[in-house]
Amino acid sequence: MDLAYFKELHLFYQTQLLEDTLPFWFPRSIDEQYGGYLLMRDFDGSLIDDDKAVWIQGRTAWLFATLYNTVEQKQAWLDGARTGIDFLLKHCFDPAGKMYFHVQRDGKPLRMRRYFFSETFAVIALAAYAKATGDAAMADKARELFTRCLEYARGARLTEPKFEPTRPAKAIGIPMIMINTAQQLRETIGDPRCDQLIAGWIEEIENDFVKTDIRCVMEQVAPDGSIIDHIDGRTLNPGHAIEGAWFILHEARYHNNAHYQKLGCTMLDYMWERGWDKQYGGILYFLDVYGKPVQEYWQDMKFWWPQNEALIATLLAYSLTGDKKYKNWHETIRHYTETYFHDKEHGEWYGYLHRDGTVAQTAKGNLFKGPFHLPRQQWYCMRLLWELTGRP
Amino acid sequence: MDLAYFKELHLFYQTQLLEDTLPFWFPRSIDEQYGGYLLMRDFDGSLIDDDKAVWIQGRTAWLFATLYNTVEQKQAWLDGARTGIDFLLKHCFDPAGKMYFHVQRDGKPLRMRRYFFSETFAVIALAAYAKATGDAAMADKARELFTRCLEYARGARLTEPKFEPTRPAKAIGIPMIMINTAQQLRETIGDPRCDQLIAGWIEEIENDFVKTDIRCVMEQVAPDGSIIDHIDGRTLNPGHAIEGAWFILHEARYHNNAHYQKLGCTMLDYMWERGWDKQYGGILYFLDVYGKPVQEYWQDMKFWWPQNEALIATLLAYSLTGDKKYKNWHETIRHYTETYFHDKEHGEWYGYLHRDGTVAQTAKGNLFKGPFHLPRQQWYCMRLLWELTGRP
């Protein structure tokens, strides 16, 4: 084992998380007046909007509770989690129990969307908070909301369809988000359903989305797993597939499962080959499976989150296999992100770079970006390295 | 009057339209098997998808019928219009009479959206085709569909709302599209409602969207015209506002109305000042009214359509006022677009450039781009210049 390297890395991720990322966001983002968090912030931390994105309220509550559960039992972290949990439960559900997407500072609803991602992020927040507090009623809430997510994912509880039934398709995002949600639930408050459910979703990804003949992980396929040869069906999202790869590598590590390890590494290999920009570095956003133009025009930009997913996936793959290729990839992307994404003056990362690494947009928080992918990456890598090196 | 310049320009736009843009698309895009058009094409004309975007089926039928009505009574143009009209009427309405957004090659529906832009483009197509054929029943269809658009625009016929009622807003896109649709209807088959309706929409834009104190045209405002100080409410779309400016300058010219002329020029002035990229040239896509980050990350890209709208607006403004500033702007953007957007090898323009003018995405046709903004611009400029110079 590469102990010296792991120790050095551990210090790096711990320092970045605790001394750079978290201080950018907190304590200033706690909304003392209405509860929840004020997270829509420019590069220098100034508030650009006091609205609240429900996904990110949930993700932030998850982060606080998770830090409390796994790093240190700081009262400020527990309090930080509580304000988000309270805000979610008080304001973010409509009368029918479906969660909103976007609310005002005071909690009044702005937008409902048909997807159930607000729910999945609330599940992991509630579960982590239930563990932190030992509150059995909160744990029940988490499990009930997870049940609701299962109903949405299976189509038993219908969300309004976006497309007509002419050309049915399914997206890798559903099994992916469900795997991660179930892993979080299992590893906080426990849920006897999770192992088997996760195995089923991994099987679906392996059978229907991973294409060995063309070395590719599809983002969308027909219900039988065949490629839909239209623009949307051909569009790949390498950072997303690499996120899926590390969810599966996490499962490989959890169960010491060699098949999952091989599958996760294969998915990472395929999508690194396709997604890594050999000219400028970084993971590209969208590609067409056959090299045609995709619908999106910003497909060659570099977003913060795919790079974070690739940092986790490469470190997990290296720690599981010892293959130097993954160490090399991890160091390559770590160097790349430190050079281009990390704002060493104000802390945190920029979210949106042009292909060549120049900053396209300076917001560090908005409807889709907040304290999640970056601190989750730093936290995950730090904890993995603790386990590999023995926590100091 | 700058006659020599206008004659030279006239030749330029006529040549570009008839010998460069149209031959890129036709005859190869006529779908001989199912009717309608196969328009999703890469830079070299190769087909990347055989789906059909309903907006663009309507816009293309409009283009053919308009060329037939105003340039030359070519049978191929009339036949070109007919196949699109037939396809729209046969396949693009759902059982309740709402138009789809995206259909398969064979006309089976793929996606319905809540907006009524498919309808507005069908109105102008039906009206132009009714004029070309003298078919009174077709003219009635166009007027009936326009009535339906009026009901959508007024909220009398409800489309499913995207936002909760917490923070009501209205977009400049509604009065804008209605002005242009009514102008087309009036100037093809005639409709006694149009003059008054157009006057009302221009009044709404002037009162609620044009902000003299900050020299700005807002894209979205509260129902009373006040600025909504949140990310969406602050987001400007200079190319769109400039399109609105030329719709109003068209009205100024049609009625010889000095007030509209001043209003249109003012809107152009405000949004050219804000939207023209002084570093690389071209109209930027999105800006924040107060210079903060917008939600979109590709906001500094250069799209083909805002440049086309600015070409029309600057030429109209110059022809109406004789102010050399507008001639200078027109020449600046004409030179810019010829240099960066025009594909002189394969014809037509690229759709999506990075801020610095390099090509980001090579498709010339997809769900949103087709033979519309570019040929409409070339056609509009050519016809305006015919009228100014006496058609040869």
Image (cartoon, coloured by chain):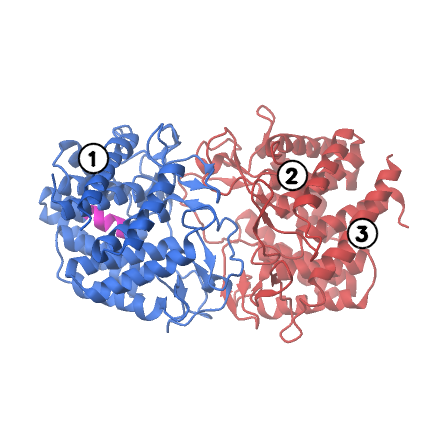
Chain colours: A blue, B red
**Residue at x-position 55% and y-position 64%:** B97
Q: Position of residue B60 (x, y in %)?
A: 67, 60
Mark seen at residue A80 = 1
Q: Residues within 10 Å of mark 1 (few under 14, many from 20)?
A: many
Q: Is circle 2 on the same chain as circle 3? A: yes
Q: Residue furthest top?
A: B213
Relative to A194, A33 lies left or right: right
Residue B117 located within the stretch drawn in magenta: no
Image coordinates for residue A365, horizontal then vertical, percent: 37, 37
- Are circles 2 and 3 on residues that touch, CB within 8 Å? no
Examine the image and state in which quarter residue A143 appears.
Answer: bottom left
Q: CA distance from mark 2 to mark 3?
A: 23 Å
Residue at far bottom of view: B33
In this picture, which residue range is highlighted in magenta?
A119-126
The reply, left or right, for residue B298 in relation to residue A138 is right
Q: Within 10 angstroms of label 2, few (less than 14), some, or many (20 or more) residues?
A: many
Q: Report which residue position mark 3 lands on.
A: B14
> Which amino acid lies under the numbered mark 1 shown in the image of this protein?
Gly
